[in-house]
Amino acid sequence: MNPPILKDPNATDLHRTGYNHLALRVENLDSEVNRLKEAGILMKNQPIAFHDRKLVFLIGPEDVTIELVEWLH
């Protein structure tokens, strides 16, 4: 038995409550963004500075938002 996988129609809504994205820490955001763009990964925004870190949001599998974060020291 393999039940069908249902796609969440609200997967891209970052304002909803509960799980809405996955954040991953990276050492060098700019190089990761370049590497992922070359691999065909789509970005939701350009990298931005936010408090003590840089971040970018990606369109992940099944439209789940993935956030890459580089802490600035």
Image: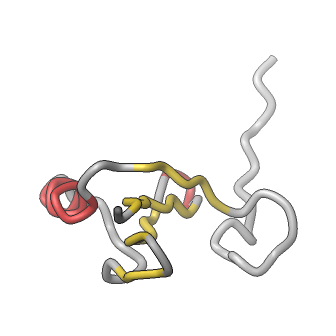
Give the left or right position of residue 44, taking residue 10 as reference: left
- Residue at 76% across / 80% down in the picture? 15
Give the left or right position of residue 42, taking residue 37 as reference: right
- Percent across and percent down for residue 24 are 48, 49
Quadrant for the N terminus, please. Answer: top right
* The one of 5 and 55 positioned closer to us in this rendering: 55
- Percent across and percent down for residue 67 are 49, 62
* The one of 2 and 44 positioned closer to us in this rendering: 44
Q: Say how the picture is coloured.
A: secondary structure
* Residue 35, quarter of the rendered image: bottom left
In this picture, is 52 found above or below 35?
below
Q: How many marks?
A: 0
Q: Please, which residue is most extreme toward the top here? A: 1
* Residue 47, quarter of the rendered image: bottom left
Q: Please, which residue is most extreme toward the right here? A: 17
In this picture, is 44 found above or below 66?
below
* Residue 36, quarter of the rendered image: bottom left
Quadrant for the C terminus, please. Answer: bottom left
Q: Please, which residue is most extreme toward the front here? A: 73
- Residue at 45% across / 65% down in the picture? 59
- Residue at 85% across / 61% down in the picture? 18
- Percent across and percent down for residue 48 are 37, 82
